[in-house]
Image: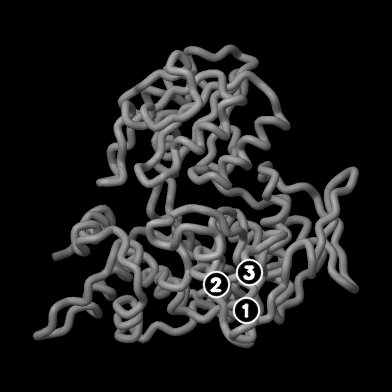
Amino acid sequence: MKRDLAEWLEYQLRTHPQSIAMGLDRVREVATRLGIGRPGENVIIVGGTNGKGSTVAFIEAIARAAGLRVGAFTSPHLLRYNERIRVDGIDASDEMLVAAFERIETARGRAGEDPVPLTYFEFGTLAALLILEAAQPDIAILEVGLGGRLDAVNIIDADVAVITTVDLDHQEYLGPDRETIGADKAGILRAGKLCVLGEKDPPSSVLRRAYEIGASAIRGHSDYLIDRLDEGWRWREPGFELDLPMPALVAPAQLDNAAAAIAALRALPIEIGELAYCEGVARARVPGRLQKVADAPEIVLDVGHNPQAVRQIEAWLRAHPKPTIAVFSALADKEIGELSRTLTASIREWCVAGIHDAGPRGLSGAEVARRLDGVPAERVRVHGTVAEALASARAAVGPDERVLIFGSFHTVADAMKALRSHADEL
């Protein structure tokens, strides 16, 4: 049966009984049947709790500014599935994705055998590897979906592995604390290869794994340093330094992400000039990362949905004080109480909503409100959808105030769709 892209994606959601099924045996078996090799001449894999998408964007923008051919695989997407796979900044077409899915479907089923079960993410990973291998970019950048050790991306050996940060998220899959989660994320490291650790104090489990397998660790704020200047900032290591403009991405952690991207590129056997570093840092963009989409009133979008990400939002709000109403929704497995406690002092009012297209992880607006902690009931308004919560928030703010939309990719995507449908009002 011939399927279009939407039909393929719906089929993939039905094919496997679980949305997340950790393990590499199934996806590796299908990759072997497909004859998948290296997705690029040089491969960088980016893992971590937060900052993965931004780090990929910095690597991609710098390498493209240097005239290199670049492929990238990221997840999840905001508005279109095609956003997940890019070659030279251009999203994969429906036709490319459908052709890849058809090959994967043929490979996972053999005559007389039960088909190898694949999750939605595993289908997408294999499609990305097929598309990138066909394009043969100078650099292929692969973003880990969940954890590292058992993530589908980990069937590929990286020339450079990046672990941006390690913090609490997806504990039901990765473990209860930073050390356990760090050990899982360190599964993307390879013996004799370089790894970049983006945060100042990574878990000892990550360093221990690097030592055990003989991976060379390059540590942020140790092997390379970040200096803030009156205008811009400086990246430096012994014998080399770069004076750079501030990124357009505004969260406090973005300097760490840009610095890790630079370290990863410098670890490759590729010559990149200073101008390309400057242009790439300035040009890198990622939707939904403290993204301002309107003024008077200001409307800001952020996909932050775990404690570390929301601490970044809080730091930005403190640095840019303005009366703020939040449009918020999150999935059932998120620490909603901790997220709300972090932001209580900076948010005047909460317009909360349900997420209805996330299967068993979805919540109603009433349940989101019930899980808030430290927020007086009179400061909370409950809505059925993100679009309704956004309309309520916009009606309640003045021209010198702010609407902050955050909580998950679903929340931001729904808000983007609502804003697009009322673009003439912005």
Say if 249 sits above or below 47 in the image. Answer: above
Q: Position of residue 422 (x, y in %)?
A: 43, 24
Q: Alpha-carbon distance for marks 3 and 1?
A: 10 Å
Tag shown at residue 183 = none
Image quarter for residue 92?
A: bottom left
Q: Secondary structure at mark 1?
A: helix
Res 69 visible: no
User: Is the residue under label 1 in contact with that under label 2 (CB below 8 Å)?
Assistant: yes
Q: Secondary structure at mark 3?
A: helix
Callout 3 environment at 10 Å: few (<14), some (14 to 19), or many (20+)?
some
Which residue was labeled with disc 2?
A: 186
Q: Amino acid at mark 3?
A: Ser
Task: Name the side, left or right, on which 217 lies relative to 306.
Answer: right
Q: Amino acid at mark 2?
A: Ala
Mark 2 or mark 1: whose residue is earlier in sequence = 2
Mark 3 or mark 1: whose residue is earlier in sequence = 3
Q: Residue at x 50, y 12 (%)?
A: 396
Image quarter for residue 312?
A: top right
Which residue was labeled with disc 3?
A: 204
